Amino acid sequence: MQSSSERIARIASHLHPPSSQMEETSLLGRSGCRAKGGTPGFKVAILGAAGGIGQPLAMLMKMNPLVSVLHLYDVVNTPGVTADLSHMNTGAVVRGFLGQAQLDNALTGMDLVIIPAGVPRKPGMTRDDLFNINAGIVRTLCEGVTRCCPNAIVNVISNPVNSTVPIAAEVFKKAGTYNPRRLLGVTTLDVARANTFVAEVLGLDPRNVNVPVVGGHAGVTILPLLSQATPPSSFTPEEVAYLTERIQNGGTEVVEAKAGTGSATLSMAYAAAQFADACLRGLRGDAGIVECSYVASQVTELPFFASRVRLGRGGVEEFLPLGPLNEFERAGLEKAKKELRESIHKGVSFIKS
């Protein structure tokens, strides 16, 4: 039987990152009491967990019953976030990791890695303005994934997603660990906005609306397929133009409303948690898990494209066809592809240059 001092030391170890790879391995061993998690489940790491998206996302993942171990990594403030979340009486054990020296410990043995790290968008700033800073951050974090959990599913949130997902792919290719079915750009917020805005127009509960959103995750690359909305609905040309523009500019709407104090953090965290849950249910073997995601794809001639995919134990198990598009959507698709092509090239060139 353990002494009281041993029990106290065991509890304290959950809050303080291990100082070595060996210590981390022992903490995660299945023989180690709650180091294996309070409930059966998956090991999830959030990289950028102390940021505006990372904190609410960490809370939502701490609440997810499929998560047994939750690792929080950031370059600042993770001890406080970790201590705060560790007081929640849910099954997942939460541990914090601070600074690049602890990145590998944060990633070792993870099943799912979620990357919201990076600087947020500010008023007047385009997603391209974020590129030089966030591209380097994503590269560094993905290099850690290649070393410590090369078989993990990776969810990329860091903007501009149209470029950061190709960056991640190139990092994995250079390391010889690339599995395109396990690298997914998170575009779920576009779907959430589409469902919400369409529901407002139709007077429905947004939970009962489903609008596929394809293309990418910025401006005109965001293409809601309103003709394929569920439940089937008819929209006037004016409604189509209004809804499409609002869905495409949803991020700007939040940035301007926050007047310089931030970007879409709460809704993004909500959407990211939804998508992460879908990935975990796929890993568990649940059937019929269909989500929109920005992935390596042959749905179009572009190497990356957001569309509906079926998730499973291997990540993306099936690419669903775009389906019939009307004239408005076909024109929108061509605009989206033109901009996507440039964004993809920019991401690939960042690694190869």
Image: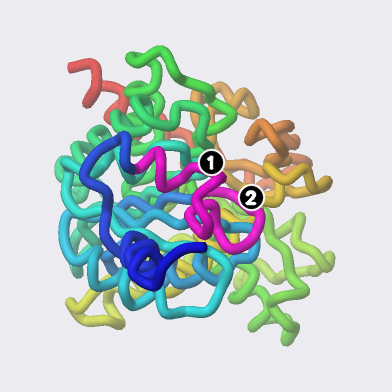
- Residue picked out by circle 2: 280
Is residue 161 shown to the viewer in this render?
yes
Judge left or right: residue 167 versus residue 314: left
Residue at 74% x, 70% y: name it: 209
Compared with residue 50, is residue 47 higher up or lower down, i.e. above or below? above
- Which label sits on residue 171? none
> Few, some or many C-alpha atoms within 10 Å of disc 1 (few <14, some 14-19, many ≥20)?
many
Whether residue 264 is visible here, answered yes or no, is no
Give the magenta range. 24-43
What is the three-letter code of the residue carrying label 1?
Asp
Residue 206, quarter of the rendered image: bottom right
Dot in front, 1 or 2: 1
334 part of magenta stretch = no
Of 348 and 222, the residue lying toward us: 348
Image disc number at residue 111: 1
Q: The C terminus appears in which quarter of the rendering? A: top left
Q: Dot 2 surroundings within 10 Å: few (below 14), some, or many (20 or more)?
A: many
CA separation in Å, label 1 and label 2: 9 Å
Image quadrant in which you'd find residue 193: bottom right
Q: Position of residue 195 (x, y in %)?
A: 64, 69
Please identify the quarter of the rendering in which residue 166 is found. Answer: top left
Where does the image place residue 300, in percent across and percent down from the top left?
Answer: 60, 27
Give the percent coordinates (x, y) of residue 337: 48, 35
Q: Position of residue 73 (x, y in %)?
A: 29, 53
